[in-house]
């Protein structure tokens, strides 16, 4: 009897090529393996939490504070929104996909008077029209998802920041799938709240939200008529309880301080290592690595005869959104790749769930060691499902990009 080989059998888990959570570097995994410490102990506060938040300022390219909290990307978004927006405040939400919609929902919950600036999925943002809409509305805040993970698109955050500044609005930026993979210049772009999560290009475990807070955001919090309705996630409490006077906070330097929410010690230790690895690599190389890996992945899928979903001007270096071949079910591709070849990719979301596939190049996975096996598995899985690309064509195209950019 011929034996049918299931290649995934020898693996203990699938390789994570979804757009986050992503693979963890071994030193980050090792940092999780330690006995519990007390989160309010001075040695944790001064030896782990503070150095990690200070080092994160380099990753965020800011001189402001970076606040780490238990949760995820959406915790950071919600903390940012609930801290600076009061019921009735006008907010202009740019919605170019599923995560723009998430921001709209969060703003709704905090009672904002919101206007959505809708962008067709995968299509460019009309900056001139946005500028006139911002001029007309004069909102308190403008929100943007820098890298729309649902459509594999990167939007021009610097330009939106300028528009926000011109109309005196706060600029709230979701960088959940861009920070540490794509250049994000918090201060230079005038980002007042830069909100993200731990599990994507930072390559730390899922479980933390991060917010970089600029001076104008602190002022907006100081000027509130009423305190934020969230006790745990009111960012102002970090200023009052944790940030020393010498950095613009309210805690006299050297005095005991409190965390507004109990900080997970293991996750912070893992983040400390993740940030060290990022800074040792250096941001310029890290961004370039993501750029090359994403170009190689795109070249590979296009050489298999597939098209990218978004407009080429917006192609993301951390998430590829690929049109599935006609008559091939996206769910079946994901299942086949996982079960037979041991690699997990994603379908699109919402309206493009059944027509697109998504592959992440984030942190460790933005490298030939992950991109080439993924292309190989994609080719084989599609072949199993009836779509026949030239054998090896995708791999050859990707390999050429790596060869020419090493
Ligand atoms: C752009 C973007 N914003 C927000 C979120 C929500 O983050 P989380 O799942 O960490 O809560 C995600 C998650 O994928 C995302 O990609």
Image (cartoon, helix red, strand yellow):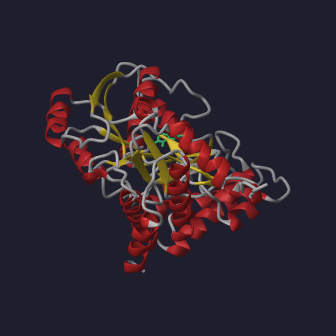
Q: Position of residue 299 (x, y in %)?
A: 37, 63
Inspect this view and state whether residue 51 appears: no
In depth, the one of 46 and 277 nearer the eye is: 277
In depth, the one of 297 and 21 nearer the eye is: 297
The correct choice, above or below, for 99 with respect to 192 in the image is above
Q: Position of residue 370 (x, y in %)?
A: 56, 64
Q: Quadrant of the N terminus?
A: bottom right
Q: Is residue 270 left or right of residue 240?
A: right
The correct choice, above or below, for 122 with respect to 396 in the image is above
The residue furthest front is 1
Q: Quadrant of the C terminus?
A: bottom left
Q: In the picture, residue 404 is in which quadrant? A: bottom left
Q: Position of residue 321 (x, y in %)?
A: 41, 47
Q: Position of residue 151 (x, y in %)?
A: 39, 42
Instruction: Give the number of marks.
Output: 0
Q: Residue at x 42, y 32 (%)?
A: 103
In depth, the one of 394 and 36 nearer the eye is: 394
The correct choice, above or below, for 200 with respect to 328 in the image is below
Q: Residue at x 62, y 58 (%)?
A: 23
Q: Residue at x 46, y 27 (%)?
A: 106
Q: In the picture, residue 133 is in which quadrant? A: top left
Q: Is residue 107 left or right of residue 269?
A: left
């Amino acid at each position: 009897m011929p034996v049918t080989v299931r290649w995934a059998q020898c693996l203990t888990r699938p390789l994570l090529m979804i757009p986050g959570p992503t693979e963890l570097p071994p030193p980050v995994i090792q940092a999780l393996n330690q006995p519990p410490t007390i989160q309010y102990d001075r040695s944790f506060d001064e030896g782990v939490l503070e150095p990690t938040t200070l080092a994160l300022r380099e990753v965020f390219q800011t001189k402001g504070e970076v606040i780490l909290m238990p949760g995820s990307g959406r915790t950071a978004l919600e903390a940012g929104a609930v801290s600076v927006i009061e019921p009735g405040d006008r907010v202009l939400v740019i919605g170019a996909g599923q995560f723009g919609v998430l921001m709209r929902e969060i703003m709704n919950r905090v009672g904002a008077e919101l206007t959505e600036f809708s962008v067709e999925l995968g299509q460019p943002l009309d900056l001139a029209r946005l500028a006139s809409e911002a001029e007309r509305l004069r909102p308190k805040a403008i929100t943007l998802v820098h890298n729309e993970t649902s459509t594999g698109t990167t939007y021009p955050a610097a330009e939106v920041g300028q528009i926000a500044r011109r109309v005196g609005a706060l600029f709230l930026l979701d960088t959940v799938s861009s920070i540490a993979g794509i250049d994000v210049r918090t201060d230079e772009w005038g980002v007042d709240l830069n909100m993200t999560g731990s599990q994507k290009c930072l390559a730390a475990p899922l479980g933390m939200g991060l917010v970089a807070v600029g001076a104008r955001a602190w002022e907006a919090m100081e000027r509130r008529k009423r305190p934020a309705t969230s006790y745990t996630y009111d960012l102002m409490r970090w200023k009052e309880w944790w940030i020393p006077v010498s950095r613009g906070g309210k805690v006299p330097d050297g005095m005991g301080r409190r965390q507004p929410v109990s900080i997970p010690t293991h996750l912070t230790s893992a983040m400390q290592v993740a940030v060290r690895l990022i800074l040792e690599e250096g941001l310029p190389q890290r961004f370039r690595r993501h750029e090359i890996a994403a170009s190689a992945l795109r070249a590979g899928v296009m050489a298999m005869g597939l098209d990218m979903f978004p407009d080429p001007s917006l192609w993301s270096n951390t998430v590829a959104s690929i049109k599935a071949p006609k008559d091939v079910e996206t769910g079946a591709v994901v299942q086949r790749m996982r079960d037979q070849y041991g690699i997990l990719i994603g379908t699109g979301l919402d309206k493009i769930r059944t027509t697109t596939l998504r592959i992440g190049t984030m942190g460790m996975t933005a490298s030939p060691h992950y991109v080439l096996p993924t292309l190989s598995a994609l080719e084989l899985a599609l072949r199993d499902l009836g779509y026949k690309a030239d054998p090896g064509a995708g791999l050859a195209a990707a390999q050429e990009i790596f060869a020419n950019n090493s």
